[in-house]
Image: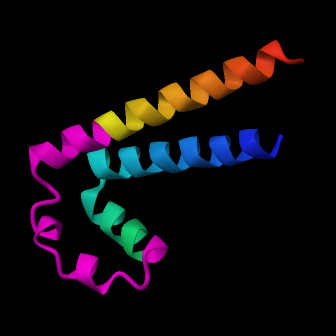
Amino acid sequence: MLIVSVGLLLALFMIANGVLLVFWPKRFLRFYDFWARGDYVGKTALWRRNVERIEYRFLGLGTLVAGGVVLYNILQIVGRHR
């Protein structure tokens, strides 16, 4: 049950990152800074300037879909074992 809980948290985290990166890139940066407080290299990286470009929106869309697939598979596994 612990592995299922960790998997659910991972899937929801991926979905949250994907949604923020696709629709609200600036909020994604704040979310990233919250979860990676000690990452001083990431706070000065060049990708932060380009986060609103279309490539990052596609990356967010891929993350959103991957998180949805993980969530769907976990729910299918849990449903079979009931």
Residue sitting nearer the eye, 37 or 19: 37
Q: Quadrant of residue 74?
A: top right
Residue at (26%, 76%) from the top-left corner?
42
x, y percent for residue 52: 15, 56
Q: Quadrant of residue 54?
A: top left
Q: Report the label total.
A: 0
x, y percent for residue 62: 31, 34
x, y percent for residue 77: 72, 20
Residue furthest to the right = 82
Q: Quadrant of the N terminus?
A: top right
Residue at (30%, 43%) from the top-left corner?
60
Colour pattern: rainbow
Residue furthest to the front = 3
In magenta stretch: residue 60: yes
x, y percent for residue 72: 59, 23
The part of the chain drawn in magenta is 34-61
Residue at (41%, 51%) from the top-left corner?
17
The correct choice, above or below, for 57 with respect to 26 in the image is above
In magenta stretch: residue 9: no
Does residue 28 appear to the left or right of 52 in the view shown? right
The correct choice, above or below, for 37 with respect to 54 in the image is below
Q: Magenta part mainly helix, strand or loop?
A: helix
The correct choice, above or below, for 62 with respect to 21 in the image is above
Residue at (34%, 64%) from the top-left corner?
27
Q: Quadrant of residue 65?
A: top left
Does residue 16 appear to the left or right of 80 in the view shown? left
Residue furthest to the top = 80
Does residue 36 appear to the left or right of 48 in the view shown? right
Q: Quadrant of the C terminus?
A: top right
Does residue 53 appear to the left or right of 26 in the view shown? left
